[in-house]
Every structure is written in structure tokens, then in C-alpha cells.
């Protein structure tokens, strides 16, 4: 297997250093996924920029977490499931909801379940979601704008999900309690 480096401020390509510095200033540490992305300053910058845009969408925090967990699960990203589970649990997501999302089970809240199903369909069907899926999503109270917001999430999560697939990034210590393997991939 190809070995990938875990960069830090001192070893990263020069163009990645300002991005790393900004991330560390904001969050206090550089997660292993970002340390590996620093090999290509462009992917690191793109991921962080798109992540910032995602935070500005009209979806609420819980809705954004539902989308990210559904996408990470569908793409079988063990690193992203662990890290997002950590973030979601710290953000107050109820344990039962988090467990359902990790297991791919229906959510009790019908509106959030429609969101989970739509986000999963966007990834599973590579954007070719059928009219019925869009109608069910809209009927649950979401908007056409939200369709595009889910596409934004799928786009930026592809960067991290595929980075994990290629690099097998080591899961950071704070996320290890949330280690995960997609059940049907185990």
C-alpha cells in the first residue's frame, strides 16, 4: 500500500502552511485527515472552504449533521464516521438518533428521515435521484434550495471520504471511541 505522510506545519508543503495555521487557530489541532490532505494544498483549501460554505446553508445544525452522517455512511468512510460522530455527539445529537444514523436505520422524526433518505440517494445514485425522491424530500418541508445544499455536502464530503479510502488515515485519538465499519462492508 502507498504510504502517505501526516504533515504538520514544519513538514507541509509551503502553500499548505497558511491553511494549516488557520485551521489550528480556529480548532486548536490539525486532524490526521487534514494532515494527509496537506500533500495537496489545493484539496486541503478546497475542503475547508466548502466545509465553511456548508456551515452557512439554510439547514440547521442537526440537519447538517444528519446529512454528513448519511453521506459518510453511504460512502463507507470509517474516518469521517468516527470524526463526525464525535462532533455530532458533542453538539448534542441524541444518542438514539446518532446510533440510527451510524446503523443506517430510519429516524423517528419524519422530516429528518426524509433528509437522511435524500442525502443517501444523492450519493448512492450519483446525483441521478428520481423525481419521486425529490418530491418526497420537498413534501417533507424541504426546498429546492435544500436540494442544492445536499449536493454541496456530497461534493465536499467526497473529498474527505475518498481521501480516507486512498490513504487509510489513522483515526485521531479523540475520535477513536466512535470507530465504525459499515456493517455490510465488514
Image: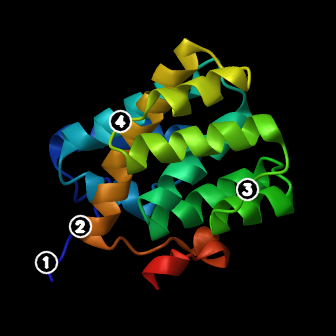
Q: Which residue is mark 4?
A: 127
Confirm or deny contact between disc 1 and disc 4 (CB under 8 A). no
Instruction: Tell me the mark number nearer the camera, choosing from 3 and 2.
Output: 3
Inter-mark Cα distance, 1 to 3 = 38 Å
On residue 156, the disc is: none
Q: Which residue is mark 3?
A: 106
Mark 3 Cα shell of 10 Å, populated few (<14), some (14-19), many (≥20): some
* Residue 121 at x, y percent in the picture: 48, 44
* Residue 55 at x, y percent in the picture: 58, 28
Mark 2 or mark 4: name the one nearer the start of the chain.
Answer: 4
Instruction: Tell me the mark number nearer the camera, choosing from 1 and 3.
Output: 3
Mark 1 Cα shell of 10 Å, populated few (<14), some (14-19), many (≥20): few
Confirm or deny contact between disc 1 and disc 2 (CB under 8 A). yes
* Residue 97 at x, y percent in the picture: 80, 56
Inter-mark Cα distance, 1 to 4 = 30 Å
115 relative to 146, above or below: below
On residue 2, the disc is: 1
Mark 1 or mark 3: name the one nearer the start of the chain.
Answer: 1
Number of labels in the image equals: 4
Inter-mark Cα distance, 4 to 3 = 21 Å
Inter-mark Cα distance, 1 to 2 = 9 Å
Instruction: Tell me the mark number nearer the camera, choosing from 1 and 4.
Output: 4
Confirm or deny contact between disc 4 and disc 3 (CB under 8 A). no
> Going 65% across and 68% down the picture, which residue do you hit?
103
Amino acid at each position: 500500500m502507498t504510504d502517505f505522510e501526516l504533515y504538520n506545519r514544519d513538514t507541509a508543503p509551503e502553500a499548505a502552511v497558511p491553511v494549516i495555521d488557520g485551521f489550528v487557530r480556529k480548532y486548536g489541532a490539525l486532524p490526521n485527515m487534514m494532515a494527509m490532505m496537506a500533500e495537496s494544498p489545493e484539496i486541503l483549501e478546497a475542503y475547508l472552504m466548502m466545509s465553511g460554505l456548508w456551515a452557512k446553508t439554510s439547514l440547521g445544525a442537526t440537519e447538517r449533521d444528519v446529512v454528513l452522517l448519511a453521506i459518510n455512511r453511504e460512502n463507507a468512510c470509517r474516518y469521517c464516521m468516527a470524526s463526525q460522530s464525535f462532533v455530532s455527539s458533542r453538539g448534542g445529537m441524541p444518542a438514539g438518533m446518532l446510533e440510527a444514523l451510524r446503523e443506517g436505520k430510519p429516524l423517528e422524526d419524519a422530516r429528518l428521515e426524509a433528509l437522511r433518505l435524500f442525502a443517501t440517494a444523492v450519493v448512492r445514485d450519483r446525483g441521478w435521484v428520481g423525481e419521486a425522491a425529490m418530491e418526497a424530500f420537498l413534501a417533507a418541508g424541504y426546498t429546492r434550495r435544500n436540494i442544492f445544499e445536499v449536493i454541496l455536502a456530497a461534493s465536499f464530503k467526497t473529498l474527505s471520504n475518498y481521501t480516507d479510502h486512498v490513504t487509510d488515515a489513522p483515526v485521531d485519538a479523540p475520535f477513536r471511541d466512535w470507530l465504525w465499519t459499515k456493517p455490510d462492508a465488514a
